[in-house]
Image: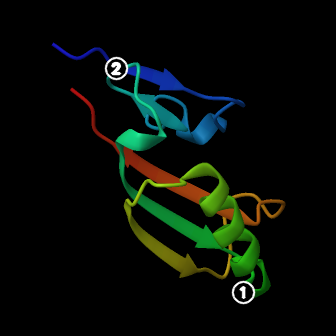
Amino acid sequence: MAVSTRHDPFPVGEQYRGIYAHGVETRSGVTFADIVKMSFFLMRREDMDTLVEVRKELLDGVRPAITTVFVAGLVSPDWLVEVEVVACAE
């Protein structure tokens, strides 16, 4: 049976406490090679080249399905990108 651990690198807003986590880990020991799907939400089109370079650096040889969406805003006005990752390991 998998054990789930919630991760909140910084506090969740009061209105979301109890219904939201920044991340959920269901099986430990996964690596970048276990990533099967990534979604990127970018605020600015001019950051696309930087995103591609970061992906090349971190995912060299890993080929997950990827979706990139340009958005009008994220939860925090200071954020320029949000990343969603799905990984699978045995």
The spot of residue 10 in percent (x, y) is 72, 31
Residue at x 39% of width, y 60% of height: 63
Q: Which of 74 and 67 is in front in this view?
A: 67
Count of marks overlaid on the render:
2
* Image: 2 above or below 65: above
- Amino acid carrying label 2: it is Ser
Q: Mark 1 points at which residue?
A: 45
Q: Name the residue under label 2.
A: 4
Element at label 1 = helix
Q: In which quarter of the image is the C terminus?
A: top left
Q: Nearer the viewer, residue 5 or 51?
A: 51
* Label 2, label 1: how far apart the Cα atoms are: 35 Å
* Image: 65 above or below 11: below
Q: Are marks 2 and 1 in contact (CB under 8 Å)?
A: no
Q: Which of 25 and 32 is in front in this view?
A: 32
The spot of residue 57 in percent (x, y) is 66, 55
* Image: 5 above or below 63: above
In-image side of 13 versus 62 (left or right): right
In-image side of 32 versus 13 (left or right): left
